[in-house]
Image (cartoon, helix red, strand yellow):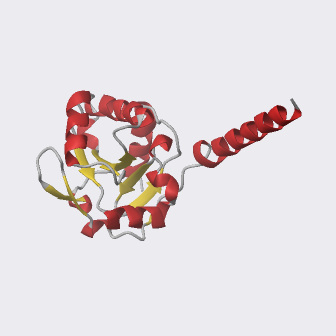
Amino acid sequence: MKKTYLVLIAVIIVLIAGYFLFFNQPETEFKQSKIDFGKVELKDVKTGQKIIINQFDKPILLESFAVWCPVCTKQQQEIKKLHDSEFKDKFISISLDTDPNEDEQKVLEYIKKNNFNWYFAVSPPDITRSLINEFGTDFVNAPTAPIVLICNNNVKKLKSGIKSAEELKEEINKCKNT
């Protein structure tokens, strides 16, 4: 009986620590990135078009996700709300699948199933490594709903967890003021 209580207490401690490590992180301020986003080339899985992140003159929401992740889908539904609103022309979204076990076909099926209509790419291993080096391993931990806001060649990692469409809109508006 004592052993069961000790195991239960250990599990509770791990869950509480996990919460503070992954879901209670403050967002960062805008900073100069170590990654040269001007050279990051991705392939949009819907069109096959090559995109370079800094080719856009709007703020960019760069999101890491995996097709198996329900938290990611919820976050993307919030992003979709922005794309379906009058705010749609104010920003660019790029959803980057960082799961090495997934491919373009899985991502294409996923975006069609969910009716998402923005850029989706499978992250090349060197880009994934660069993102981990810059933002830590939680950037490829899909259930933390990681998003980086890129603005005027500066980046800001947003807090972990699902961000509402309104929160994302506020962050994008702050970006315009940098």
125 left or right, relative to 134: left
Residue 36 location, x and y as percent?
33, 70
Residue beneath the point at 46% across and 55% down: 156
91 left or right, relative to 155: left
Residue beneath the point at 11% across and 51% down: 48
Q: Quadrant of residue 54?
A: bottom left
Residue beneath the point at 26% across and 35% down: 110
Q: Quadrant of residue 69?
A: top left
21 left or right, relative to 6: left
The mark total stands at: 0
Residue 92 location, x and y as percent?
27, 46
Where 90 sits versus 39, above or below?
above
Where 169 sits versus 99, above or below?
above
Q: Quadrant of the N terminus?
A: top right
Residue beneath the point at 23% across and 40% down: 89
Of the pair 123 and 116, the residue shown nearer to us: 123
Where 61 sits versus 131, above or below?
above
Q: Residue furthest right?
A: 2
Of the pair 173 and 91, the residue shown nearer to us: 91
Q: Quadrant of the C terminus?
A: bottom left
149 left or right, relative to 113: right
Of the pair 151 and 103, the residue shown nearer to us: 103
Residue 25 location, x and y as percent?
60, 48
Residue 49 location, x and y as percent?
12, 53
